[in-house]
Image (spheres, rainbow, N blue to C red):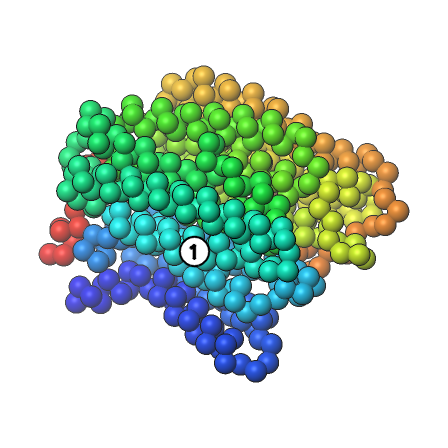
Amino acid sequence: MMLQLDIIAILPELILFFGAMGLLMVGVFSSSNLCRPISLSSIILLLVAAIVVLFQSEEAQFAFNGALLMNDFTALMKALTFLAVAASLVLAHDFMHLEKIERFEYPVLVLLASCGMSIMISANDLIAVYMGLELQSLALYVVASINRDSVRSTEAGLKYFVLGALSSGMLLYGVSLIYGFSGTVNFQELASLGFTGNDIGLVFGMVFLMAGLAFKISAVPFHMWTPDVYEGAPTPVTAFLAVAPKLAAMALFMRAVITIFPQAQDAWQQIIIFMSLASMVLGSLAAIGQQSIKRLMAYSSIGHIGFALVGFAAIAGDNSAEGVSGVIIYVIIYSVMTIGTFACILSMRRSQGMVEQIDDLSGLSQTRPFMAFCLAVFMFSMAGIPPLAGFFGKFYVFRAAINAELYTLAVLGVLTSVIGAYYYLRIVKIMYLDAPDDEVNLPMPRNLGFLAGASAFLMILFFIYPKPLVSVVDNAADAFLEVDVQPGYVHYQDTTK
């Protein structure tokens, strides 16, 4: 009976894993080119997994002797991750064919990475954390260098692999220290020890654990891989790396730190505040001089992670729910903005091929008005200009910081947001005020136009009707806090009775 319940609990992961294995066999043994059918099948599998996640039990439940946790928070983050991955495969649909790098292995690897992300989100002990993280990372190293004929792509994959291996080693060292000084790897059992920051061994373990996870979300000072990998990887892969792994890693980061060290807030909060400030400042300043729009998006993503960490730092005391809700809303809005932006970047195609320079957008409003309008919406939203969704994302995290009495962090966050607005508005100025180039962009493909239009619509819709998303996020935040902030609230042993 317990095994049946465990299998049901990991049904989305099983769908993705066995689906990936089946598609791999089809691709290997088929004599014809089945890249597109395999890609379409992968998108369907991800949508099915997202639906299964949303229809699983609403009550918190544990699986495999407490190694995995399922509740409203994990269900929401898994569904969002699966949808983001599906969107990235839609982005890749035409690009891979036009660039002659279409391979059936790409969607299979993406499915395996998605399975790892799902395990990361549900992980409730440190062994499951590492398993999920490595399953995701190993697939990502390969997809970053999927264009084997490109020196830039190969270099991006190699850099990602080397630095990723370093971060994995740091995380594993932190895990070993935590286990060595506590005797357990289960999140709730670790929380029940009442660690307050006095045990030097657990302090070192916590720092190494946070360093390893910070690498996965590109938080400063563990961001060094991001610009080169974003620029060198094929653009659909960059879109994938910018969204789905960030969603999973942020969910894991919050759950691991807040669950394991609920009484050591003074210790980990200072680290989060530093990462947040450093990420916001570097993301805002370093992007100003960029000419490649992909490198600009890399520094932009670092800055956005800094804003999300403002909400993370505010998860304390009576305002915990507000902080959790702020982080979730921010990463959701960031994901939609990023997918829409990359749909526009992938449409920057001329007769000679793809172009990636910001100046190539000159006069776009005159030649491709729909694409210019969508990209302008995303730029205004990323800059945090009302009434678009990006403004409300920043509003929620800054409000949580002010209510948690983190006034300096909130003020500096607003200032860096103002600085960052410069390079977003510069793109709008180039599109609407500069003269168009002699050669214009080709028309947007239908799939990219649909994603860009839908994303822009959602950016505007949130201002008009935010209630459904806010309600879902509040329920997820309550589920997060029920299990994670109260040490010993529920132990996996209780669920087996």
Quadrant of the rendering where the N terminus is positioned = bottom left
- Judge whether residue 397 can be spotted in this image: no
User: Hey, which quadrant is residue 328 in on the image?
Assistant: top left
Q: Specify whether 344 is left or right of 270.
A: right
Tell me where residue 470 appears, x and y as whole percent: 44, 40
Q: Specify whether 111 is left or right of 254.
A: right
Q: Residue at x 20, y 52 (%)?
A: 66
Q: Residue at x 76, y 33 (%)?
A: 429
Q: Residue at x 42, y 71 (%)?
A: 21
**Tag 1: amino acid:** Leu
Q: Residue at x 48, y 54 (%)?
A: 140
User: Hey, which quadrant is residue 252 in on the image?
Assistant: top left
Residue at far right of view: 438
Note whether 488 is above or below 282 in the view shown: below
Quadrant of the rendering where the C terminus is positioned = bottom left
Residue at far left of view: 497
Q: Specify whether 231 is left or right of 404.
A: right
Q: Which residue is mark 1?
A: 138
Question: 308 or 33, which is in the foreground?
Answer: 33
Tell me where residue 306 appears, x and y as whole percent: 48, 31
- Mark 1 neighbour class, 10 Å CA radius: few under 14, some 14 to 19, many 20 or more: some
Number of marks = 1
As helix, strand or loop, the secondary structure at mark 1 comes to helix
Note whether 214 is above or below 85 in the view shown: above
Tell me where residue 91 appears, x and y as whole percent: 61, 57
- Judge whether residue 137 can be spotted in this image: yes
Question: 409 or 186, which is in the foreground?
Answer: 186
Tell me where residue 367 appears, x and y as whole percent: 83, 48
